[in-house]
Image (cartoon, grey):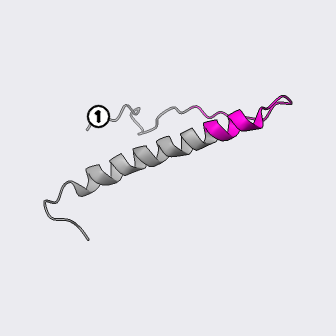
Amino acid sequence: MKTGANEYGMKRYVMAFLKRGPNQDRTKADELQRLHMANIGRLADGIVRAFFSRWRTPWY
């Protein structure tokens, strides 16, 4: 399986830290956060569906 790692199994990642500036529009920030969380939920839903689609019968 090819994972894009080097010969030691290591990959390079980038991490960013965001900080609030002095001119933050709270209404816009709240809307962006709501959309961000909705997108994370959508992605998680897809992962769960993909995982459980292996079985033909429901897991519950």
Q: Amino acid at mark 1?
A: Lys
Horizontal and vertical percent position of residue 20 = 78, 35
Q: Left or right: 4 with respect to 54?
A: right
Residue shown at 84% from the left, 28% from the top: 23
Name the foreground residue: 44 vs 23. Answer: 23
Residue at the extreme right: 22
Residue at the extreme left: 56
If the image is split into quadrants, where does the C terminus sit?
A: bottom left
If the image is split into quadrants, where does the N terminus sit?
A: top left
Q: Left or right: 45 with respect to 13?
A: left
Element assignment for label 1: loop
Q: Left or right: 53 with respect to 46?
A: left
**Residue 36 sits in quarter:** top right
Name the foreground residue: 12 vs 29. Answer: 29
Residue at the extreme front: 27
Any part of residue 50 in sight: yes
The magenta-colored residue range is 14-32
In the rendered image, which residue does mark 1 sit on?
2
Name the foreground residue: 44 vs 15. Answer: 44
* SS assignment for the magenta stretch, majority: loop
Horizontal and vertical percent position of residue 54 = 18, 55
Q: Is residue 27 magenta?
A: yes
Horizontal and vertical percent position of residue 18 = 71, 34
Q: Residues within 10 Å of mark 1 (few under 14, many from 20)?
A: few
Q: Is residue 18 magenta?
A: yes
Residue shown at 40% from the left, 34% from the top: 5
Any part of residue 17 in sight: no
Residue at the extreme top: 23
Residue shown at 13% from the left, 59% from the top: 56
**Residue 31 sits in quarter:** top right
**Residue 6 sits in quarter:** top left
Horizontal and vertical percent position of residue 11 = 47, 34
